Amino acid sequence: MARDARPLRILMILESGFPVRGGGGAESQVRTLSGELRRRGHIVTLLTPRVPNAPQKRIDRCEGIPVVRLGYPRLRGVARLVLWCRTIAFLRRRGHRYDAWHAHIAHWLAAIACTLARPGHPVVVKVSGWWELEQGVLAPDASWLARLARRALKKASAVQAISQRIAGELVRQGFDRARIVALPNAVDTRRFAPGPAPRSADATLRAIFVGRLVREKDLPTLLEAWATAFGNSTMTRLRLIGSGPLEAELRARAEALGIGNALEFMGHREDIQALIDESDLGLLPSVIEGLSNTLLECMSCGLPVIASRISGSEDFVIPGRNGWLFEPGDVAGLAACLREAAALSAERRREIGLQARQAVVANASLDSVVDRLTALYRGAAPASLAPPVSTLAFRS
């Protein structure tokens, strides 16, 4: 895709704190995209609420990105209204300085942006996860106020659906099909690349999970399946990378299953790529996702993956080619996948992992995603940038 050389000024709108230690996928994507846009010479500013678990400075910089944090009182019934008013005031006073606005969560602030945008001014709204469709303003049982916000979101010049399942749900909810872009999360495939040497010098199978230790990740199913597949075998190791409220419960469950010695709870880590390089298998047993960044990062590093058949994962993981899929919550199905992966030679797993990388490079590389986003920021028609949402756009 040819690139217009004219630098852009882009306002990123994020309805959560930034930066947040161990933050979610939306925060991670804002950092990844903003860094690449700045590298290309564009000017990026981030607008975000001032929340307790993030820095409190009103005007700040994070990795060179200007961050504007909107404060609001922590009073029930008032907080939301004040935040909305301050968002409106910012966009009215300063919004004209930016060539495009990109809202990274399809919720209240995104709806405000869609309402205030001038005709012809690009506003890209990203549906960043299944949460927006089940609990946010797009939920089936949404309030009348949320339904008004949903109507506003439909005015966006482009709606970024990061999975085919999300794209299909947006069509079902009445979003204009021509405005929906099937565009996945971006991965820096230069950073997340296969290591120089085969993994596992010995015969031990090393598997890795990266994510928060929360209910949505369904780690109890993973522990049950691990025990079913391998029992107390000393030839398998499972690393859980991340922190969260379920750690004590998961430790106790692992001990009760007799697999405590096979597990490593490693907490929050910054050296994710190095840990992936030490692994033979990536795992994602979630019951809900939009499209997992860590799934794509594992695949980009050439790691074969076992994932539940949910939004996003089902677009990239192709059984028999680059990994394995099982139905969410299916202990027996996951155990069967684990046994099948363990029975393969290290060389065969590496071949499968390289197929996984090819799928990510072809469909979710940082260069490709940012090319398409900048075209949207310049006013390109969404339908010209991606296949129709009725097709599987992400499969190679």
Image (tube, helix red, strand yellow):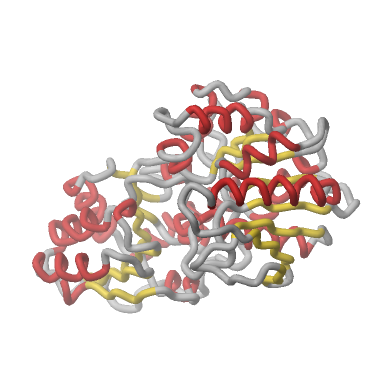
- 253 is higher (above) or lower (below) than 333: below
Q: In this view, does 318 lie to the left or right of 226?
A: right
In terms of depth relative to the viewer, which is nearer, 9 or 337? 9
- Total numbered labels: 0
331 w.r.t. 61: above or below: above
Using the rendered view, name the quadrant where residue 31 is placed: bottom right
Depth check: 374 or 245 in front? 245
In this view, which residue lies farthest toward the right?
Answer: 6
Q: In x, y percent, where is residue 113?
A: 69, 41
Q: Where is residue 8 in the image (x, y as percent from the top left)?
A: 84, 52
Location of the N terminus (image quadrant): top right
Q: In which quarter of the image is the C terminus?
A: top right
* Left or right: 60, with 142 as reference point: right
- At horizontal 62% and vertical 61% (from top left) the residue drawn is 71
Asked which quadrant contains residue 139, the reply is top left
Query: Image height check: is 105 above or below 179?
Result: below
| Horizontal and vertical percent position of residue 54 | 54, 68
Tell me which residue sits at (28%, 43%) in the image. Answer: 328
Q: Can residue 396 be seen in this view?
A: no
Horizontal side of residue 348 vs 231, given as left or right: right
Residue at the location (33% across, 54% down)?
217
Res. 309 in view: yes
Report the front residue among 310 and 300.
310
Q: Is residue 78 left or right of residue 328?
A: right
Q: Which of 263 and 200 is in front in this view?
A: 263
